[in-house]
Image (cartoon, coloured by chain):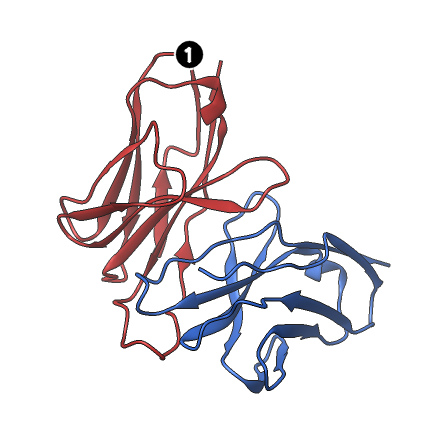
Chain colours: A blue, B red
């Protein structure tokens, strides 16, 4: 499974846009990039997934360059409730859907 | 739908004791997983199952056993608990994996079981 590298922590303020970049230099052809969000004392929750270019849903956007060696999760206009740990994962549907969680990025949104 | 539920929510064990954690899902998912999460760390896969009656080892399987006798249930057992197994345990489930090159199926997580081994 491809490994990922992302910043340990980030601080932001309410109303700002938060961008978290994840490096996955060894991503395989069949791998998809998935982001999960985890609040304290809760299990992770799926946010967004993509393969290439840009994906947008009601929660976030995911930007993936052509070489797919990195990806950026964008959270528009964050609020205090967006304070959480965000995990970037890469995985292949054929590999038993196993996902490897790294340390994640701890995002703190301040008033 | 209750989604993924875990029993118990909290447990304290003494070294050497045994226990079983129960995970149940009502989404008819084929795949189920057990993870552990140590303080300030990411999740690590212990064991997983791709269907009823099947199990496989994950990243950190030592000291744990699992069983998937029914599609909706996935049990995690600790035969002889050790302080190093103090952690929060999460169960997850997902749909049957599709063909290579298609998106990975979303994993749905339970609320976790906080286990302390003294």
Occupied quadrant, residue A28: bottom left
Which secondary structure lies at badge 1? loop
Occupied quadrant, residue B40: top right
How many labels, in total? 1
Give x and y (percent) for residue A77: 77, 74
Q: Is residue A65 visible?
A: yes
Q: Is residue B33 left or right of residue B71?
A: right
Give x and y (percent) for residue A10: 78, 57
Give x and y (percent) for residue A59: 61, 75
Residue B89 sits above or below residue A15 on the image: above
Q: Image point 70% across, 73% down: which residue?
A: A75
Pick out the residue farthest to the front. Answer: A26
Q: Nearer the viewer, residue A29 or B70?
A: A29
Residue A82 sits above or below residue B110 on the image: below
Name the quadrant of the N terminus of chain B: bottom left
Q: Is residue B1 visible?
A: no
Name the residue carrying label 1. Answer: B14
Q: Is residue A59 left or right of residue A21?
A: left
Residue A40 sits above or below residue A34 on the image: above
The chain that hosts pointer 1 is: B
Q: Is residue B66 left or right of residue B90?
A: left
Give x and y (percent) for residue A84: 67, 55
Q: Image point 49% across, 81% down: which residue?
A: A51
Q: Image point 36% across, 79% down: which residue?
A: B101
Q: Image point 54% across, 84% down: which residue?
A: A52
Local packing at callout 1 (Cα closer than 10 Å; few below 14, some 14-19, many 20+) is: few
Q: Is residue A92 left or right of residue B76?
A: right
Residue A52 sits above or below residue B33 on the image: below
């Amino acid at each position: 499974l491809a490994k990922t590298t992302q910043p340990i922590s980030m601080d932001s303020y309410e109303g700002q846009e938060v961008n978290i970049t994840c490096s996955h230099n060894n991503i395989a052809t069949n791998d998809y990039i998935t982001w999960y969000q985890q609040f304290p004392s809760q299990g992770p929750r799926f946010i967004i997934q993509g393969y290439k270019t840009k994906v947008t849903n009601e929660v976030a956007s995911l930007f993936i360059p052509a070489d797919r060696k990195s990806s950026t999760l964008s959270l528009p206009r964050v609020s205090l409730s967006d304070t959480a740990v965000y995990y970037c994962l890469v995985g292949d549907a054929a590999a038993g859907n196993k996902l490897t969680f790294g340390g994640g990025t701890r995002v703190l949104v301040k008033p | 739908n209750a989604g993924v539920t875990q029993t118990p929510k909290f447990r304290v064990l003494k070294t050497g004791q045994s226990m079983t954690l129960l995970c149940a899902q009502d989404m008819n998912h084929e795949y189920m997983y057990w993870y552990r999460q140590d303080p300030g760390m990411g999740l690590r896969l212990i064991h997983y199952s791709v269907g009823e009656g099947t199990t496989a080892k994950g990243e950190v399987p030592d000291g744990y056993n699992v069983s998937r006798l029914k599609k909706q249930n996935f049990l995690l057992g600790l035969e002889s608990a050790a302080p190093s197994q103090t952690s929060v345990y999460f169960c997850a489930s997902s749909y049957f994996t599709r063909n290579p090159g298609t998106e990975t199926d979303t994993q749905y997580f339970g609320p976790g079981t906080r286990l302390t081994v003294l």
